[in-house]
Amino acid sequence: MVQEVVSTRISDAQGAADDLFRQLRGNPDSYNAVIFMAAIKYDFAALSIAIKEKFPNSEVIGASTAGEIDTNGFQNDSVVLTTMSDSRTRVKGVLVENGSKYPVGSKTDIETALRSAGISCGDPSSHQSAFAVAFINGVFNAEETILSNFYSIIQNDKFALAGGTAGFTGSEAKTFVSYNGKTTQDGAAFLFVKTPCKFDIRQEDIFNPTGKTIYVTRSDTINRTIYSLNGQRAKSVYAQQLGVSESQAEGMTFENPFGRHINGSIHIAALAGFAPDGSCSLFARVVPNSTLEMMHIGDPEKKCDETCSGIKAVIPSPKFTLLMTCITRTMAFDRMGIADSIIRKYRQTFPTFCGFSCYGEQIGRVHCNQTLVSLVMGD
């Protein structure tokens, strides 16, 4: 397995594609897959077409970002592109359109793509030599729906998936994903990978349970809103749990998210904010009649060390690394003055790497927030 990572700040879509292409060392036909991540300032549709034209024989997926990541650090206003090269590996992508309304409409396309990659639906051993990368549009709150649809098709809950919700910056809520030059604002781009190479997909969570639990008495699952906790307005209970006033609680949401119990593990649901009626909006679904953990931020640098050590224990010689980290983490690391330290730890672990700041992360069939999802491949 060989990975190349290049980046550009040229703002013109065609100029950016030309610059990225010039920097690559390999033969274009040697790349199984090309993955790009672009700041929202770019004409994403034009960029997607321009990049695909450079790699007519490769599977190409892309996503808009809330920031880009490469060996130089956490970036903004750039395009980062990475390649995957391995003669033993098969890849195939697919675009899911109208994902928030008609995700099942892409069932046949997903099945066809899986077969093309050599992956059989319903095979209980498919997870041993294959995985998926997913870039999902934000804005439409469709991550859980798209994931549920995919796992109903693959029929193997052990099948690994690493994903990131496409991001954006600025006041206009818009995100993009693309596959082979075709772009959508409501759906997902999947890349299915069948490989003899060893791979590791994991999630890093920098939050710890506080031992305080709360009960969801009323919530809107689809719109990701909690109206009442413990039988009271959500904002009041949240502030009580923190021992602060409601106005103080508004500025404490990043450090104190909710933890959901899913499949025996705790997964973060970030708070987006509070409405005047005291309800709480989230970036992930929380079902009524469930129990949440109050979480509190731990030591991100220590957790990063643990993550890197854990990956190296499984993949002693990393060859390909893709990182998808929540934008709130990126912003917090900057506020805490540890962004450069985090990147240094990645440099010490991976020969090269890239990724993006996203609006949510997917690990298997679970959508969550304020975490890092990493995909690392070896020989």
Image (cartoon, grey):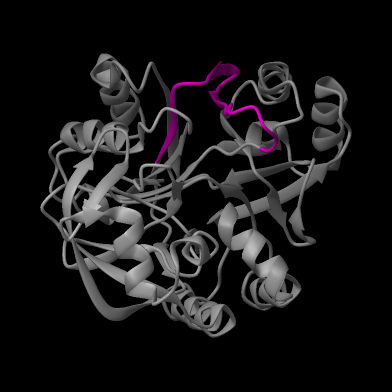
Q: Viewer-proximal residue, 235 or 104?
A: 235
Q: Which residues are magenta?
A: 169-192
- The reply to whether residue 80 is in sight is yes
Q: Residue at x 47, y 72 (%)?
A: 315
Q: Viewer-proximal residue, 52 or 173?
A: 173
Q: Which corner quadrant of the image does residue 149 belong to?
A: top left
Q: Viewer-proximal residue, 378 or 301?
A: 301
The mark total stands at 0
Left/right of residue 367 with respect to residue 248 in the rendered view: left
Is residue 30 shown in magenta?
no
Left/right of residue 57 with respect to residue 22 in the rendered view: left
Q: Which corner quadrant of the image does residue 261 belong to?
A: bottom left
Position of the N terminus by quadrant: bottom right
Where does the image place residue 264, in percent across and percent down from the top left?
16, 67
Q: Residue at x 62, y 54 (%)?
A: 2
Is 208 above or below relative to 245? below
- The reply to whether residue 1 is in sight is no
Where does the image place residue 41, in percent across and percent down from the top left?
76, 30
Is 177 above or below relative to 298? above
Is residue 179 shown in magenta?
yes
Is 299 above or below relative to 320? below
Q: Residue at x 42, y 53 (%)?
A: 271
Where does the image place residue 283, in percent across and percent down from the top left?
41, 46
Q: Viewer-proximal residue, 344 or 180?
A: 344
